[in-house]
Every structure is written in structure tokens, then in C-alpha cells.
Amino acid sequence: MNSVDLVIRGAQVVSPDRIVPAAVAIAGEQIVAVGHDDLMPPAAQELRADGLYLLPGAIDSHVHFRDPGYPHKETWKTGSAAAACGGVTTIFEMPNTNPPTGTLEALRLKQKAAQSSYVDFGIHGLFGDDTVDRLEELLEGGVTSFKAFVGNTFGNLPAPSDGALLEGFETLAPLGIRTVVHAENSSILQRRERHLKAAGRKDALAHLAARPAVAEIEAIARVIILAEWTGARLHIAHHSAADSLYLLRDAKRRGVDVTVETCPQYLLLNTDHMLRLGGVMRLNPPIREARHNQPLWDALMDGTIDMIATDHAPHAPEEKTRADIWACDCGFPGVETQMPLMLTEVNRGRASLMDYVRWSAVAPAKAWGLYGTKGVIAPGAHADIAIVDLQRRGVLSQNRLQSISKISPWNGRAVQGYPLHTLVRGRFVMRDGQLVTEAAGWGRSVKGVQRMPTPQPRHTEHFIGAVLQTPPGVPRTATPLSDVAE
Ligand code: DOR
Ligand code: ZN
């Protein structure tokens, strides 16, 4: 038997339908065997993992690494180090950088910044009125997917018009490419914020008052209509409200290819925390009332929500702690704390480890066309593995985060369950809880392994590309036929 690079022994291997004791052999970047201890090939290196669990590395569909544009908030090196130390082996990075990732030149800057990544990555390109004619060019340039900021947020990118959304979906539907949507209605948000400011409100809850759940409901309904009409794949980012879940349930039942993420903050935090923490917790969509928390868990359980992402949105502490809520930047870091937070809920019996793997790895791998290569511990897959100690207890500390943004609403929270080691394509990027600094730059784009199956686009006869020419046999003017006949 050929010798391999690494054999991990003594752990339990977790998939969405079972947890089995098994050894795992890794050669180069791939898993080559999963099975009984005695059947493992000889290995250059062995790792004893007794009592630990091997999870497919988490795939986070939603992070902001800020480079180019805001390196004082985060860089690819620090953000991806946070991912590595959080058991996250692949991230998808958002386009609201400066410049936004909506031109080939901006994409080149981002790809350059991404060369320092510890973990594998996809790049969401910008989908807006100004970029909708460039989507194919951006795909050829290396983006894996797109993001439409239908609700305005950090970076103040204008929301795409409904017309541009429809045209972009018409372009992307035949290609099978999925679009992430920040689903809030911009005009509702802007008017509300104006009124609240004029009334002198600057307290923490004014932010929620400016972004009511109806803004999310309306935007989700709208993008589902356009995606269903065109056949385009849709991904709802950071789902926050109980009240819009029915739209997703109905759309899924009708066969619309819509995937949905929520984040630990929407599952575990609510306005009670916002009152204590103020601007630190300001983010978009907002943290809502406690009545939203449990329905989001229920929706994860029944598959209405497919996955956990983090919306890792780092800002500098001074940008988060101003007295006026409108002056506090929106978002906070999350890619490093997601796994301990969710494992703590597993330990509390709120979900099984198998559920967690479905939400953290399998569902995102499927949504982005990576499943089989990523999202699973099986021969032939990339050796992207989080080795987890479910017993280990600790307290989350913002000062110990890899992120530059050392300010987090999770600071001081007791957790049980940590990733101890993280492997990306066979290489340790975190070992014994420590970042492996030499692994900076090991991460690479998943574009090369992404396989999006082509869907059946709907209503192609109305697509903009199909209607620009007068069809054969149709008079070239609208003059009534009776007049032409003379
Ligand atoms: O709170 C947020 N911050 N929500 C977003 O959608 C964007 C993010 C950011 O980029 O800071
Ligand atoms: Zn975001």
C-alpha cells in the first residue's frame, strides 16, 4: 500500500446522517481513505484524535474581508486567519469593498489581496444597475457568484432597480449561477431613517425601528417573483425575521431554487441584548425582538433555512462605540466565533452534530456547486476538516480574535465546543488552537472546482435578449394592418 501524508485516528467522523468511529487517511490535498483503523495505509504523520469529532470544514457563504478599501477594519490575511481558527475552511467574500467588485480591475485587486488567504475562497461579484451588463465578464474573470444589495448597507451601494434585477437574473439563469440577495426594501429603510433622525432618535432601538421586518418580507417576495419567472438561482443572505419564512416555504414547495442562510446573531440575540450593547450590535438586517429567535431555529430544523453563515462584518472599535446609533458602523466579526457558538447549542441539545454539519458544510457546498469536493469527509474530497473538541469549555474573548476588529457582542459569552485543528486541502492552518502562520497564502479560489448544474430557465421568450429584434413576419411599425393593405 502506498504511503500517505497523514492518518487521523481515534475520532468520530460526522456527516448529516451518521456519526461513525473511523480513521481518515490524507494524501496531498485529498482524503484517500475513511475506515477502520487497521485498514489505513502507512503514513508519514499520525494524529491521535481520541474523543474528538471530525467535521467537514465549515463553509461560510458570507464574509466581508474589506480589502481593497478598508484594511484598518480587516485584511484577507487577518480575516482568513479568523476563519482558520474558527474551523472554517472555505469562505465567500462580499463585493462592498472599495472599489466594489463590479469591474475586472476591481476584481484583480481583490484577487491580489486574496493571495494571502489561509482558507479557500469564492468571490461574490457586484450585481447592480452599473454592473448588470458585465456579469459574464466578471464570471470569466473569476467571480463564483453575485451579490445584490437590494437593501442598502455598509458601502452605500445603490440598490439595483427591479428592471436590472430581472435582466441580471435573465443572464444568470441559463448559467446556473446563484445570486446572494441582501433582502430589505431600500426605500422603506431610507424614509424611516430620515423620519427617526428628524424626530431626534439616536438610541440603539431606533436602528430596528428604521428596518422593520416588513422591509425584509417585501424584498424577499419581490426577488422570489423575479427568480421564479426567470429560473435564476437565489440565495437569501442573513435571514432575520420570523414573518418572512412563509414566503420561503412556499417558494421552495413550488420548486424555486432558493437557498437561505441565517447567522448565530439572529438565532441567539435579540433586542434585550441590543439594549445592553448598543452600537456594538448594530447590523443589517437588525437584531429583532425575541419572538424571532425560535422560529428561525424551527426553520433550520425543517429545511426552510438551509445553512449558517456569519456575515463577518468587521469594523474598528471606535467605529462601533459612538453615542449616536446612526454613527455606529453596521456589523461585527463572526467567522471565528460561529463554530463554538453553534457547538454550544449542540451541547445544550438544541440540535445534533449531524444537523450542524448539514447547516455549516453540506448545504453551502451544495448551494455553491462544491459538494463532493468539499462539504464531506469521503475519499476523493478535499481534506478540509475541522477537528473538534465538544467537551472543551471557554469564554469568548474579543481580544483574542484573529480579526483586526476586536469588538464583538459575543465577548464574555461562555461556550462549550471548539475546533482544535483545522485542515485546508490537507494542510494544517490551525493546530492545537494556534494559527499556523506559514500557511498564509495556502488558500485558493474554488472557481476551479465549482460545478453549477444548469437549470431550466423559465419564460425565455420574454428575456431581454430575445425581444430586441422585431420577430420575422411582424410588421416593423405599429401601423394598423388595414392602413398598410392599401
Ligand atoms: O451589518 C452589516 N454590515 N450588514 C451588511 O449587510 C453589510 C455589513 C458590512 O459590510 O459591514
Ligand atoms: Zn454582509
Image (spheres, rainbow, N blue to C red):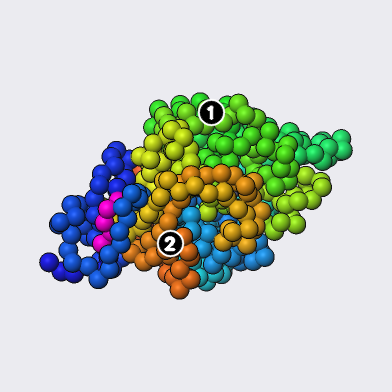
Q: Callout 2, which amino acid? A: Asp
| Residue 347 falls left or right of residue 28 | right
Dot in front, 1 or 2: 2
**Residue at 45% across, 43% down:** 343
Question: Where does label 1 land, which residue?
Answer: 294
Q: What SS does tag 2 mark? A: loop
Measured from the top left, where is residue 50 in percent x and y?
31, 52
Distance from label 1 to label 2 (Cα)? 34 Å
**Residue at 33% across, 64% down:** 426
> From this viewpoint, which residue is outermost toward the bottom?
438
Q: Pointer 2: residues within 10 angstroms few (<14), some, or many (20+)? A: few
Q: Quadrant of the N terminus?
A: bottom left
Question: Where does label 2 land, which residue?
Answer: 432
Viewer-nearest residue: 174 or 374: 374
Is 444 situated above or below 36? below
Measured from the top left, where is residue 395 in percent x and y?
57, 48
* Disc number placed over residue 376 in the picture, else none: none
**Residue at 18% across, 59% down:** 40
Viewer-nearest residue: 252 or 384: 384
Q: Is residue 113 magenta?
A: no
Q: Is residue 9 magenta?
A: yes
Q: Callout 1, which amino acid? A: Gln
Residue 388 appears in the picture as rendered: yes
**Residue at 62% across, 54% down:** 398
**Disc 1 residue: CB within 8 Å of ligand 1:** no
Contact, mark 1 vs mark 2 (Cβ under 8 Å): no
- What stretch of residues is rendered in magenta? 7-11
